[in-house]
Image: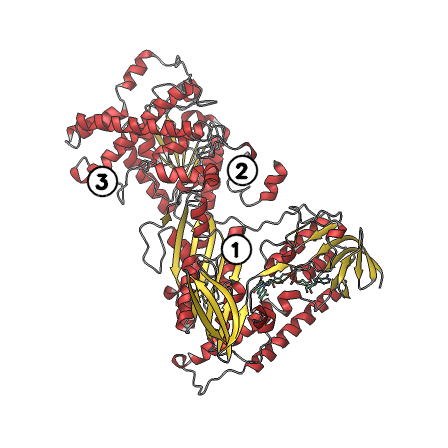
Amino acid sequence: MAGSFDVVVIGGGPGGYVAALRAAQLGAKTAIVEKDRMGGTCLVRGCIPTKALLQSSELYTLAKGGQPFGLVADNIGFDWPAAQKRKASVVDQLVKGVEGLLKAGGVTSYRGAARLAGKGVVDVGGDQVQAKDIVIATGSAIARIPMPGAELTIDSDQILELREVPKRLAVIGGGVVGMEFAAMFAALGSKVTVLEMLPQVLAMVDADLVNVYTKHLAGLGGEVHTDTKVEKVVKGNGGLQVQFSSGGEGGAVEADQVLLAVGRVPYTDGLDAEKAGVKLDRRRVVVDPHLHTDADGVWAIGDVIGGIMLAHVASYEGVCAVENIAGHSQRVPDYHAAPNCVYTDPEIAHVGLGEKEAKEKGVAVKVGRFPFAASGRALTLGQSEGFVKVLSDPESGRLLGAHIIGPRATDLIAEAALAIQNGLTLEQIDLTIHAHPTLPESLMEAALAAQGRAIHIANRRSTAAPPAAPTQTAQNNQNREKEMATTIKPSSPPPTPDAINAKSLELTKNNRDFLLGLHRQMQLIRRFEERAQEQYTKAKIGGYCHLNIGEEATVVGGILALKANDWIFTSYREHGHAIARGVDPKAVMAELFGKETGTSHGRGGSMHLVDYSRRFMGGYGIVGGHLPLAVGGAWAVRYRKQKDVVFCMFGDGATNIGAFHESLNMSKVFDLPVVWFCINNRCGMGTPVEAASAVADIYKKACAYDMESIQVDGMNLREVLLKTSEMVEKTRIDSQPRFVEALCYRFRGHSVVDPDKYRSEEDKVKWRKADPIVAFEHELEKSGLADEEYFKNVRQEVDAQVREVIDFADESPDPNVSDLYKYTYAGQWDNRPELRAERV
Ligand code: FAD
C-alpha cells in the first residue's frame, strides 16, 4: 500500500474529509485514512442519524395535530423500525456521497487504523505512507463516568439502534445530545425524565430559551430535574431505577432505558501521538493558533482539539489547516460567529454573545425580541411557540448575538451568523428586504424592536439592558461601556418638538421646556469650552484646541434643526458640535485627553469626535477636507432611498478651497440631500473674510451652483433654528442641496493659543455685545419664561457637570498599547483578530 503524499489526513469525519477535499483542490497530493465508515461520528452516529429520526418524530407530531389543518387520518401510529430503516438509508446515501466526492476529488482513501510512525510517516495496519504534512482529525468518543450501574445504561450510539421506543426513558445529562433524544422520544410517547447536575439543562443556551423548551417538554409529560446528582442505576420493578440526590434529598426514577449522555472526549487511542511529539492536554491535542501541533508537519482539527465540538466547526478548521499547509494564507480560526443548533421541539439556535455572557462581562447591549406568535408565517405553519432575540452594541448598532427558539430556528440562525461574521448592524438587517410571509422576517422584526421601531409588535419604551457589575478583570477592559452607561448625566439635546416652526419657537409657556433646554445646551457648550481651554494650558489636552465660544447659537440652532437619523459631517475637534448633537460630554473630554473612554477610544490624537450612534462624523478632515465626505454620505442616503439629510458644517476659511467647489457642484449635479452649513465667524484661520475671499457674503458662492442659499444671523438662536429647519425639511422632501450661511463671531480667536491680533478692539467689543447666550437670556427674561435666579442656577449646574466631565476624563484609563490598532477604523479589527495579530 505504500504511497507518498503531500497531505495525509487521519479520520474521515466532517473535519477530515473536508480537509482532504480542500487540500486536493489546492493541488496537494492527498490521502485520507479512516478506520470505520467515511463520514465519521457526524454521518454515522451523530448529526445525520439523529436528525433523520427527529424528522420522523416531528412528522408524527404534526400528523397527530393535523385535524385543524384539514388532515383526515384515523389511527395515526408510529412504526419505529420503518423510521430506523429510513435513517439507515439516509446515512448510507451520505456516506456513499462522501466516498464519491473523495474519489472524484482525486483523494486516495485508505481503510484502517492509522498511527503516527515517525516524522512524515503514517502507519496504516502495518503499511507505511509518507506524508509531508499530516492532519489529525480523529474526532471524539463517548465520555464515560465511573458510576455504579453504568453498564446498565445505553449511550448515544446504542440508543440509535434500539428495536423499540421505550415506554419510560431516563436521560442522564441535559446537554445537546441528551436533550435531542429527550425531545425525540417524548414526541414518540415515551415518559421522559432528564437528570442534570447543573442548575440548567443546555447550560450554554440563554435561560429564557431553555424555559420555553422545558415547558414544551412538560406539556408532553416530560420532567426535568436540575441540580441533581445521579448516584447509581439499579435493576428493579421489571426495569431500571435511577437513584439520585437533589438538594440533600434522595429520589428515584423508574425507566425501561437509561441514556447516559454526559459528553464526549477527544479521541487519540492507538495514534501514538505523544510518541510522535504531539502534545496532549487531558486527551485533547494541543495546537497553536494556526492549528499546528508541537510536532513538525503535524496539524490537528475538529473534536480532537476540543473547543467547540461541532461538525461545522470541524470542517471550518479543516479548511483553515490545509490552507495554512498550502501556504495560501496564515489562517487563525475565528469562532465568534460559530452557530450552535439544538434540534429539540421547538428548535433552538444561537450565535454570538448571550445575555448572560454580556452581563458577566459587563458589556452593555441593546436587546430586541420578536415572538413567533406575531409572525404570519409561524401562524400558517401552526408553530408559533418561541421568539427571536437579538443583542446589539448600543453605540455602533452592530449585531453581537442572536438567540432563537421556534420553528426552523436552526435554519434561521444562518442570517444572523452571516451578519455577525461580517459586522453588520441592526439597521443593515432591517434595510434588507425580507420575503413575506417567511420566518426570517422575525429576525428583521427583532432587529427593529431593538431600535424601538418594530412594526408587528408594540415597542417597549427602552430595550437597552443595563450592564451588570463586571468582574475584576473585565473592569479594565470594559471601562468604556460600563462607565458610559452608568454615570452619564443628562447630556442629550433638549427634546425637540415634532416640527420646528415659528409657533414652536414662540416665547410662550407652552414652549418653555424646549426653549430652556436650548439655553442650557448653549451654556453647557460654553462652560465645556472654557474649561477645555484651562485643561489645554495644563497640558491635559495635546495638539490643538479649537474654541467655538460665541458661536453657541449658530451651533445649537443649526444642529437642532436635524432629526435623529440625519447625519452630521463636521471638521475635527468641534467639541461644541458634538455636544449639541448629544454626544456625551464625558466621552468628548476623554477623547481630548486621549483616554480609552473617549469617543474614538483616545486613538484619534484628540481629534476624532465620531459617534456613529448619533450619526455624528466629527473629525475626518481639516479646513474643508470633510466636504467631499459629506457628498459621499449623501450619495449613500440617496442610494438607500432614505429621507435623511446630510448636514455639513464648516467655517468660512474652507470656502476658498477646491474641495468646497467640487462638493457643492457634485451635490447639485446629482441632486444630493445635503445642507451645507457655513459658520462664517469672519476670520477663518485668522484671516479676515474680506481678505481671504473675493465674496465676503459666503452664501453668494453657492448661487454659482444654482442652489437655494440663505444668510442667517448666527447670534440669534431662534432665527438660526427656524431658518435652518426650513432648509433641512425642504431638502428632505426634494433631495436638493441647500446652503445656509450663519454670520457669527468667535470671541476667543481661532484656538486657545491664538493671540487674536488680527481683529480690531472695536470689532471685538461690538460683537461681544451681541453675545448669543446673553441675547437669548434677555428674550427669555422679557417674556417671563425665566429670571436671573434661574440662569444662575443653570450656570452652577452646568459648572458642576463640567467638573464631573473633567474628573471622568482625568480618571479614565489610557488606551492599552497592545490595542493600538483596535478602533482606529470602526469595527475593522474587532472581527478580524488575525489582522490585528499581524499588525501588532
Ligand atoms: P469525527 O466525526 O468524530 O470523525 C473522526 C473519525 O476519525 C471517525 O470516523 C473515526 O473512526 C476516525 N478515526 C479515529 N481514530 C482513527 C485512526 N487512528 N485511524 C483512522 N481513523 C480514525 N454536531 C453538529 O454540528 N450538529 C449536530 O446536529 C450534531 N449532532 C450530534 C449528535 C450526536 C448523537 C453526536 C454524538 C454528535 C453530534 N454532533 C453534532 C457532533 C459532531 O458529530 C462532531 O462534532 C463531529 O463529527 C466532529 O467531527 P470530526 O471530524 O472532528 O470527528
Mark 2 and mark 1 lie on one chain; the one further toward the N terminus is 1
Amino acid bearing label 3: Ser
Real-space Cα separation, disc 3 to disc 2, in angstroms:
44 Å
Query: Is residue 786 placed above or below 67 in the rendered structure?
Result: above
Considering the numbered disc 1 on the image, is that residue within a helix, a strand or a loop? helix
Query: Is residue 477 placed above or below 538 in the rendered structure?
Result: below
Tag of residue 822 = 2
Mark 3 and mark 2 lie on one chain; the one further toward the N terminus is 3
Query: Is residue 207 placed above or below 499 in the rendered structure?
Result: below
User: In terms of depth relative to the viewer, which is nearer, 112 or 566?
Assistant: 112
Label 1: how many residues lie within 10 Å, few (<14), some (14-19) or many (20+)?
Answer: many
Amino acid bearing label 1: Ala
Quadrant assignment for the C terminus? top right
Q: Mark 3 or 1, which is nearer the eye?
A: 1
Decide if residue 105 is in sight here: no
Mark 3 and mark 1 lie on one chain; the one further toward the N terminus is 1
The residue indicated by pointer 3 is 504
Ligand 1 image position (quadrant): bottom right
